[in-house]
Structures are given as C-alpha cells and as structure tokens.
Amino acid sequence: MSIDADAHIVLRPRGVVESADLGVRLAMAHVGPVARLSAIVLPLGLLATLGAERRYGLTAAQTWCVAIVLATAAEAPYTLVAGAVALRGPMRVRDALRDRYGSVIACALLRWFVLGIHCLAIATIFIPYMFTLSALLFVPEVVMLERNARNALQRSSRIVQTMTGRALATAVLLLCVRAGCVILGEVGLRSLVEIVLETRGTSRSLWSDGVSPYALAGFWLAVPAIAVLRYAAYIDLRTLREGWDVQRRFQRMAARLTADQE
C-alpha cells in the first residue's frame, strides 16, 4: 500500500486508545460510504448465517464459527474503503464489493483454521490463543491493501513482531467490542422488538441456547467497527515499524521542491 503526500490523516505514532479514537473519527467523517456498504453487507451476512444454521441444523458453536468466517470476509470492503479515504481518496462502494474476494475468503478460512488448530492443541489455555490471534490480526489488511495474499500470514506476523504487547491489546479491544455488540444485540434489540411489537419474544436466547437471532444481529453490527478499528491499529503499527510519518514528510518536501523548480 502506497502513501500519498496528501494523505487525509496525520501519520504519527499512536497508542492503542488513540488508534481506536482515530478509527472512530475516520468512520464518522466518512459515514456515507460506511452506511451504504452496511446496508448491503450486514443484512446479507446475517441472513447467510441464519440460513446456514437453519439449513444444516448447526449447533450454537458451529453457527458462531460460520458467522466468524463470514464476518472476516465481510470486513474486507470496509478495509478497502478505510484505506482509500484515509490515504488516497474516495472509493466507490461498488469497487470495494468486487475487489479480490477469492483471496480474502481463502485467507479468512486459513486464518481461522490456524486459530482452530491452535485452540485444539491447547484448549485449556486462553493466553496462547490470544498471542496467535494477535499475530494473525492484520491478514485482511495485508491481502486487501498490500496485495500480498500468498504470504499474508507471514506478513501479518512480521508487522506485529517486537510489538506483541500492542497487537495483543488491540486484539483484546476488538474482542471486547465484538462481545459487547453481541450482548447489546441480545439485550437491546430483543427489548426493542418486544416494546415495538408489545409482545414477549419467543425466539431462542443467547444465555440458554448459546446463540440467538438478536445476538447474531449484534455480532454483524460490529463488523464495520471491527474493520475500521483494526485498520487504524494497522496504520499505527506500520508507522512505528516503517516510519511512515517520516516518509510522508520527505514526500511533502519533494513535492514542494518540484513545485518550486517548476
């Protein structure tokens, strides 16, 4: 991914909280493309998850696995839009939806396969899983923005090398955001539907059944936030590792000198 001299964000080292704040500001500043994308991606993702559960009689754990893999692919267009509006300029939603989806889905499956094997090997220990998750955190950015699908796992691991603590904190933050949206969907959406329809909901509950349509709706509502927050963390780590802020200063100086010579 290249950096234009007129990038729309200030490239400088940030902490985890500051990176999250940058992601929120980025999404709010370009709420139009995010909203249009969400109107297409999120309903399709929720319907695909519920359809697979009903069609194949999936258990709660299997349903969540399907949702996670689908959501990883669904985050890809948000990553493209975030990268475009932050560093290069606006991107059409149509272009974001049709760019390199075969590579994204393949890497998503491979990423979660690696995590699944890791969990099975050390099922009783949570910390090693988190370190593996942090190492594979930026696979979508590597595939979509760096165009490096072949070495996506290795490249993602190298980005967080020597900065495992920061990557781990980001992974924990993203898990908390996703879990919070699932709980908000289960509690908030269920309550809203019951109030609007003036009836008690009879569908399954997250607490007793392990999954519910409301919890899945909350899970899918978290997809844009997860993608944008992770992209902001990706920008921060690459700025720290590769000196993007310094590169941008030199680009501006070169552009200024060229303009003066002309």
Image (spheres, helix red, strand yellow):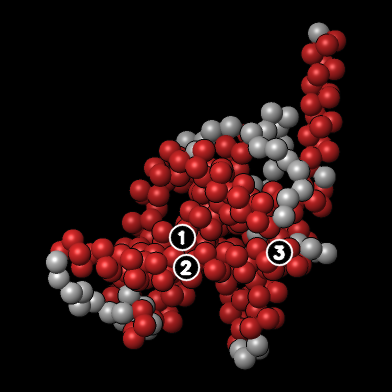
State the residue position of label 1. Answer: 222
Instruction: Name which residue lies at 33% across and 66% down.
Output: 188
Q: Are marks 2 and 1 in contact (CB under 8 Å)?
A: yes
Task: State whether residue 230 appears in this view.
Answer: yes
Disc 2/disc 3 C-alpha distance (Å): 20 Å
Instruction: Name which residue lies at 69% across and 28% down.
Output: 6
Q: Few, some or many C-alpha atoms within 10 Å of disc 3 (few <14, some 14-19, many ≥20)?
A: many
Kind of residue at badge 1: Ala
**Numbered label attached to residue 137:** none
The answer to which of marks 2 and 3 sits earlier in the sequence is 3
State the residue position of label 3. Answer: 167
Q: Few, some or many C-alpha atoms within 10 Å of disc 2 (few <14, some 14-19, many ≥20)?
A: some
Residue 60's spot in the image, x, y percent? 39, 81
Q: In screen coordinates, is 211 left or right of 22?
A: left
Residue 187's spot in the image, x, y percent? 34, 71
Kind of residue at badge 2: Gly
